[in-house]
Image (cartoon, rainbow, N blue to C red):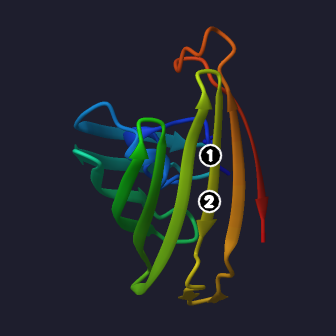
Amino acid sequence: SSTELIGSRRGAAAFTYDPGAMGIADGVELRLSGRLLPGETSRTTGTFALVLPWDSITLALGVDWLDAGADGISNQRSTLGLSLRLSERVSLGTAWRRWESDGVETLSVDLGLYAELADWLVVSLLGQHLNEPAFETGTQGSIYGVGLGLRPLAGAPWLTLGSQAMFL
């Protein structure tokens, strides 16, 4: 389970889950993150993301990985993202994600719309797996989400309280 909420981050910090928000970058952004997951066997997960804004278009490239645990299954996701900044505070983005899990590959398409309606209010709409990709265990249906971010301290983006709802 992820602690990232749609509508709560932007730029490279949102790259892995909110393609609309990745278009609101303040310049070239590079993000490398990782963590050790608790459990009987140690597993690590990590993310590398590069966000390259140019005028009103943003190109993003990245890789996420999850090392094999006791079940021996490892996962990797490569992403190419493209977003169009419709205004200073609104961005429409898409992400093409290539999933690889134990030699099985599939492609997933996501779409997102991110809007800062006021200094203190952010709304993000998201569609994941819109092409309903086939994985080894079955087909992943589309997932839709809406996120709401509130910035209670004069709209300062370093403090955003977020909430989201996801629908299958």
Crowd tier of the residue under label 1, counting other residues whose Cα lies within 10 Å: few below 14, some 14–19, many 20 or above: many
Crowd tier of the residue under label 2, counting other residues whose Cα lies within 10 Å: few below 14, some 14–19, many 20 or above: many
Task: Give residue 7's position: percent from left, percent from top.
Answer: 61, 41
Which residue in the structure is indicated by mark 2? Answer: 126
Which residue in the structure is indicated by mark 1? Answer: 6
Q: Residue at x 70, y 65 (%)?
A: 144
Q: The disc labelled 2 sits on which kind of residue?
A: Leu
Q: The disc labelled 1 sits on which kind of residue?
A: Ile
Seen as rendered, the residue at the extreme front is 87
Q: Residue at x 60, y 42 (%)?
A: 4
Q: Nearer the viewer, residue 161 or 154?
A: 154
Task: Give residue 52's position: percent from left, percent from top.
Answer: 23, 46
* Image quarter of residue 147: top right
Q: How many marks?
A: 2
Could you tell me which secondary element the residue under label 1 belongs to? loop
Q: Is residue 155 above or below residue 55?
A: above
